[in-house]
Amino acid sequence: MTENNQMRDVFDAIADPTRRRLIQLLAEAEELPLHELTTQFQMGRTAVSKHLTILKEAGLVLDRKVGRETRFRLNAEPLKEVQDWVGFYRKFWLTNMMRLNQLLEEEEE
């Protein structure tokens, strides 16, 4: 990406189930080469590589060359944005459920 381009949105990056699975695999391992990641999917190396590129553009995946092999690892820091967003709605629903519970208890009395 050039300096003028914005990074890919983390929500866009995690919207796809394949990319979420890649994140999970990388979270479970310190680092994995492309050929090992590819064995986990029913798609070719090129398709997995495209998904990894999207995750890289969102800052979720880092890579490094080791000889002819590319190894990938998770950078979970951008997921904090998702956690913060979900946390807001967790509070929202908790507050509403508490209000509903209080209303139901008042009706029973």
Image (cartoon, helix red, strand yellow):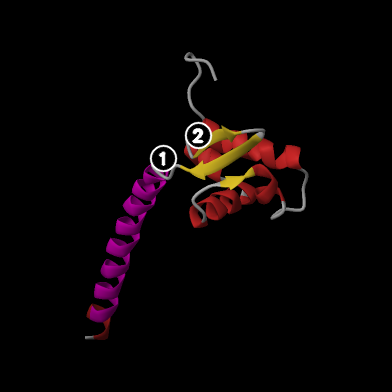
Q: Give the residue pinned by disc 1.
A: 78
Disc 2 marks a residue whose amino acid type is Ala
Magenta-span inclusion, residue 68:
no
Look at label 1 and name its amino acid: Pro
- The residue closer to the viewer here, 87 or 2, is 2
Q: Is residue 76 above or below residue 96?
A: above
Magenta stretch prevailing secondary structure: helix
Residue at the (41%, 46%) spot, across then down: 82
Above or below: residue 90 compared with residue 4? below
The answer to whether residue 108 is left or right of residue 86 is left
Residue at 49 percent across and 51 percent down: it is 30
Residue positioned most to the front: 67
Report the residue at 25% width, 80% height from top.
105
1 in relation to 103, above or below: above
Q: Are marks 1 and 2 in contact (CB under 8 Å)?
A: yes
Q: Position of residue 16 (x, y in %)?
A: 61, 46
Name which quarter of the figure residue 45 lies in: top right
Question: Which corner quadrant of the image does residue 63 belong to?
Answer: top right
| Location of mark 2 (residue) | 58
Quadrant into which the C terminus falls: bottom left
Label 1: which secondary element: loop
Q: Is residue 25 left or right of residue 10?
A: right
Q: Say which quadrant the N terminus sits in.
A: top right
User: Which portion, as a residue range, is magenta?
Assistant: 79-105
Is residue 79 or residue 105 the one in the foreground? 79
Residue 70 in percent (x, y) is at: 62, 36
When the figure is inspected, residue 21 is found, relative to residue 9, above or below; the finding is: below
